[in-house]
Image (tube, rainbow, N blue to C red):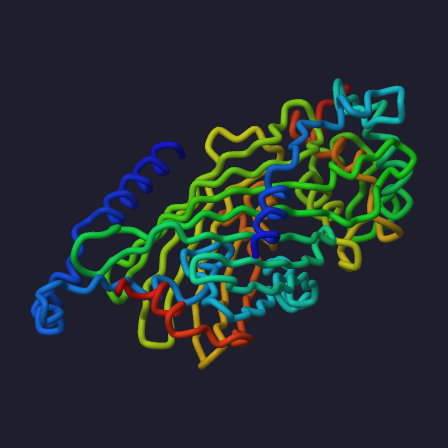
Amino acid sequence: MNRVLRILCAVFICLLYQSDAWSQNDNDLEALLADPSGEQKKEYVSYTFKSARIINAHSVEQTASGVMDMRILHRFGSISGGAYQLFGLDQASMRMSLDYGLTPWMQVGIGRSTTGKELDGVLKFRLLRQVINGLGSPITLSYVAGSTLSTLEWPEPERGNFFSSRIGYYHQLLLGRKLNETLSVQLTPSLVHRNLVATRTEPNDIFALGLGGRFKTNARMALTFDYFVVPGTKLVDHNNSLSLGIDIETGGHVFQLHVSNSRGLNERQFITGTNGRWDKGDLFFGFNLSRVFTLRTPRMSIDLGGDAEK
Amino acid sequence: MRYFLVISVFLLLQSCYYDNEQDLYPVGSGGCDTLNLSYQTHILPIISSKCQSCHGSVSPNGSLSLMTHAQIKAAEVKVRDRINRSPGDPQLMPKTDKLPACQIRQLELWYNDGAPNN
């Protein structure tokens, strides 16, 4: 397992830093578009992914300034339930969330999952943007910080329960790179902290590494995957979360259909709480639906400030 | 905006706790005993009080009998699956109510240990 992981990581790191073949092809065109002064304008890559999440994982994309992204996530029961359970569709859990772009580089969001009656809040900051030409970052780098709050009734109310036991945190770095018009990849080192765990042997802090990617098949569709591996885990009944999906864009909406061994709806759930297994057919169908609303039309100067260097 | 950032940073930096239920709720104070799990002391009482009324020896529901250690051990996959279903799921067992978190944890840890007959 560790060997496979090492190979996967090596491939991903190579992909992240490989030469920017697609932009080289455009150099002639860029030369024509260059400033008469001779200075080449720095252009940033856009649409590394179709949406702010690859499938479960955050992607380096974020909601534009002044835009609200309403997302509805559905996760169904086990496909192995057969026709009687309509392959899991009889058991749905969902998460509703609102993400808002405060500035071109900062996004805030809140969500609520039916699983565990869990509230979550998230902040996403874009630290670096991949450039198409000239000198600049070869990757897009974002930082995500979030917290989760379970609002379930205490299973044992008579014992001394603490509010802090309901809370978990997560921090992630998103290193994404658009290799060409069809292929994008992302590495996601993550830290999940749970204030209360069941046993002494279970760690409160869990380090995980996420791998994700998108292969665009045409203007409206893309194949996606994301995978979170927890190296040397001491978690009980834990399996790494692997999801395969299809993105379908229909003007303003993005549908993300997927199959996963996780029913988790937030980072705490799918990084530390996945117990389905692909090899046992313990899989779950799910979809994400995203709809964006422009609440505040950004001033041109602000908008350009995020997209192109003056 | 400035206030928002201050509040956000405060929320992110608020203290983490490193608690676990074994230390926080030690045995004897109403806590969950997950150390030295015993089939006779911990597992059998759960199975007999919560499962055997339907999964007995005579025409058990789902043709699954949970009367002997061997039967309970052999039913590991089904038991793990059903006790962990969400409330409202028709396949959640027991049908009356979800088991307390402590009992679910005890069953899982006992199965993890190879379901010993101790």
Q: Residue at x 64, y 59 (%)?
A: A111
In the figure, A205 relative to A155: above or below? above
Residue nearer the viewer, B71 or A56: A56
Q: Residue at x 32, y 42 (%)?
A: A8
Q: Is residue A15 left or right of residue A248?
A: left
- x and y percentages locating residue B112 in the rendered image: 65, 29
Q: Residue furthest bottom?
A: A251
Q: Using the rendered view, name the quadrant where residue B28 is placed.
A: top right
- x and y percentages locating residue B62 in the rendered image: 78, 53
Q: Residue at x 84, y 23 (%)?
A: B40
- x and y percentages locating residue A236 in the rendered image: 62, 33
Q: Residue at x 77, y 46 (%)?
A: B64
- x and y percentages locating residue B113 in the rendered image: 66, 25
In the figure, A144 relative to B42: above or below? below
The number of numbered discs placed on residues in the rendered structure image is 0
Residue nearer the viewer, A221 or A124: A124
Q: Is residue A147 left or right of residue B93?
A: left
Q: Is residue B42 visible?
A: yes
